[in-house]
Image (spheres, helix red, strand yellow):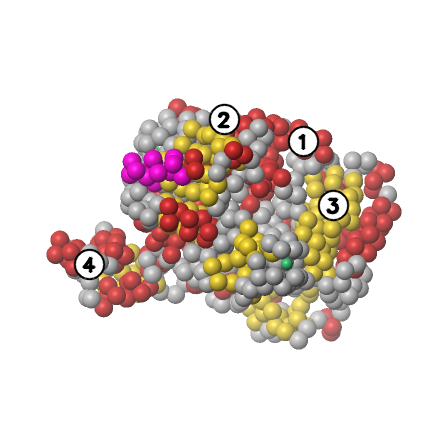
Amino acid sequence: MRVAIPSPLRQLFDYLPPDSYPAHGICPGSRVVVPFGPRQVVAIVLSIEPDTDIPTSKLKTVISVLDNEPLLPNDIIHLCQWAARYYHHSLGETLAQAMPKNLRLGKPASYGAIPFWNCIAELDSELQNQLKRSKKQLAALELISSYPQGISATELHELGFSKSTLKELSKKGLICSRNVEPSALPFTDITNPLKAAHLKLNEEQAFACEAITDGLENYRTYLLEGVTGSGKTEVYLQAISAALSEGKQTLVLVPEIGLTPQTVRRFRDRFNVPVACLHSGLSDGERLQGWLEAARGSAGILISTRSGIFTPMPHLGLIIVDEEHDGSYKQQESLRYNARDLAIYRGRQRQCPVVLGSATPSLESLHNTHQGKYTQLHLKQRAGNARPPVMELLDLRHQVLRDGLSTELLQRMAAHLGRGNQVMVFLNRRGYAPSMICQDCGNIIDCPHCDAHMTIHRYPPHMHCHHCDLQQAIPWQCTSCQSRKLQPVGQGTERTEQVLSQHFADYPVLRIDRDTTRRKQALSDMLEEVQSGKACILLGTQMLAKGHHFPDVTLVAIINADAGLFSADFRGPERTGQLIMQVAGRAGRGDKPGQVIIQTYNPEHPALQLLSMNDYSRFTNNLFIERKQLNLPPEGYLTLIRSESVNQNESEVLLSALRQYAEQSGLQQLDNSLRILGPIPAPMEKRQGRYRWHLLIHGKNRNHLHSLVGRVVSYLESHRLPRQLKWTVDIDPQEM
Ligand code: ADP
Ligand code: ZN
Ligand code: ZN
């Protein structure tokens, strides 16, 4: 039989079925354990009786068969085959990637019983009073008591309640658990899928929803471009409802940090059918459970981050990709796939609609609508009573700054807070300050392993390289001239937090960045405090930009809009524009009007001008012109070959040879739009002690480009390279 093995080798392997097992009893798509070199690995069976060139006597035998029925159905195997080909990656690794970790490790494809919690106390005012001090416990108890049938530990966990909270409540004799086998009932058995009534759609929403649900039997991609707060999620919910009533499952992809408990709750509050979810915050067992619920058809909806695109769904009938422009859909290691692009493939394969939703669509998706490949749907108005935020550029050139905050901004913040509202301050840099400079000789403390400055952190005090994770004590003298006059330069969130706490002593400052949210419950605790609606300052990095609905935020301040506009990556301005629009979209989502202040030294910059007028479409039109002039995507397609080594010249030499080889292939004579650029050093040439170089291949015709890349990859595979010299292929790269 022929199997795919999780190894970088781009080939398949043949084995004999185990003696005790009739070969026809093994189905393609099931897992087997096979000997592979010195190891035993879990492999996926692709076919039972292939023509093999290898004599039977040379074949090794399968050690054991793990599944009696196919674990990966045909459509997922085809999706993986397509992805492996498109991204020039090994099929074995691609298939491994399609499974949750427990299945990859060979554990059984079944779920164990999970605890269900029930409330056994009367939740009266006396009890409420008793629990007044332990807000989390009270909230958990209130939630549990609202589920007379009990609620699963997984669901409670997803909603932000920890094991220890539940343990405390159970110790107090207020709740108890029993183990229950999760329902294997198909979701279609539920007679009334709807738990709560839908909202009445406005005209634009109704138009979009009808367009999508009219064509549930056919493939079509819709780009749902709706300003922040325009009610895209409501459109998804009603489209899903239509799919459910036809017995169809929906796959909802969301960005990495976008999958908040509130999002999941919104879906569960609307529907009676089980909603499975998959994201990095879950345990391996919980992920397996979610995967199986979707794969066995007991869940009607799967909400997942990018890897969910590989989950089997026997009744899949609708795919939604929320915030389709988001960078987290692209995996930046191993199989460098883009889940949004695979979603299009899967929709075509399944003949079902794909909805890409965003307030700030990617240039790629906009380009596809201009070409007529996607259907564009607009939501131009905010839903309900919310009005669009008023945006304003604040010229920093004539302002007195206090650690990056202008007096004008501080005054405006005070006014909003004084009225009892919340203010959000956005700064895309964590730590105290991005660099430390010597005031005597101008030396800046650099990371010894990277072409980058060390960031200063105060809590706890240390220097940290954000590129290789190196951490050191804060030096007390200059490494170059021994002067002790070392000065932090620039602003990070820690420093801004310090200033804001001093300046606004009466209001809490909640800092939300990677450092403050390491503890699992930290983020949900802080978000809960914000939801309480009290006046406060929310300070954070791009974690704040996504998905959250903060109805009491009336002012959003962007401390430094300039950094990203002048970045080395050609997508820099696009990403900055999306970020500004998304952050701005957090303002005025409730009944109160919102205001956005953007601090900049370049108020005349055309991009900022257009963004501040809420004109994303003219902003992107300008970017299209630029990309066209420079021959960059979405004008044609791009492939990036990266190489890195601890030795300074090795990568450049390898890529030069590669270029020569590619030029000799003659493909460029066939298609003169094929262009090879480089080798050029990566924007940060040295990182983690490795020197990194790039070779870019650009072409207008995808097939020709792929032929050329295919040759390049075989060249790389067929040459023995020194061990420390690494290369990767990145199709449609997102980052340079
Ligand atoms: P988006 O996903 O576009 O950011 P949401 O779907 O989260 O927008 O909607 C923003 C807010 O508007 C939510 O509080 C939602 O309940 C409300 N909303 C959406 N559609 C309607 C509607 N048709 N009528 C009233 N309120 C609505
Ligand atoms: Zn010095
Ligand atoms: Zn470093």
Residue extending farthest bottom: 38
Q: Is residue 285 left or right of residue 12?
A: left
In which image quadrant can residue 674 be found? top right
Q: Is residue 188 above or below residue 381?
A: below
Query: Upstream in the sequence, badge 2 or badge 1?
Result: 2
In front: label 3 or label 1:
1
The reply to whether dot 3 and dot 1 touch (C-beta < 8 Å) is: no
Vertical comparison of 299 with 110: above or below: above
Callout 1: SS: helix
Seen at 48% across and 46% down, the residue is: 403
Q: Mark 1 points at which residue?
A: 626
Q: If the image is split into quadrants, where does the N terminus sit?
A: bottom right
Foreground label between 4 and 2: 2
2 or 3: mark nearer the eye:
2
Q: Which amino acid does label 1 sit on?
A: Glu
Residue under label 3, please give it: 696
Q: Is residue 55 visible?
A: yes
Write down the region rendered in magenta. 410-422
Callouts 4 and 2 close, C-beta under 8 Å: no
Q: Which of 110 and 339 is in front in this view?
A: 339
Between discs 3 and 4, the one toward the N terminus:
4
* Labels 1 & 4 near each other (Cβ < 8 A): no
Point out which mark residue 131 bears.
4
From the viewer's perspective, tell me whether residue 90 is left or right of residue 586: right
Q: Residues within 10 Å of mark 1 (few under 14, many from 20)?
A: few
Using the numbered discs, state the Cα–Cα distance from disc 4 to disc 2 in whole angstroms.
Answer: 49 Å
Characterize the magenta stretch by its predominant secondary structure: helix
Residues under labels 2 and 1: Cα distance? Answer: 20 Å
Residue beneath label 2, please?
Answer: 613
**Is 585 left or right of 1, judged from the image as shown?**
left
Can residue 299 be seen by looking at this rendering?
Answer: no
Question: Rounded to the nearest whole Å, what is the CA distance between mark 3 and mark 1?
Answer: 18 Å
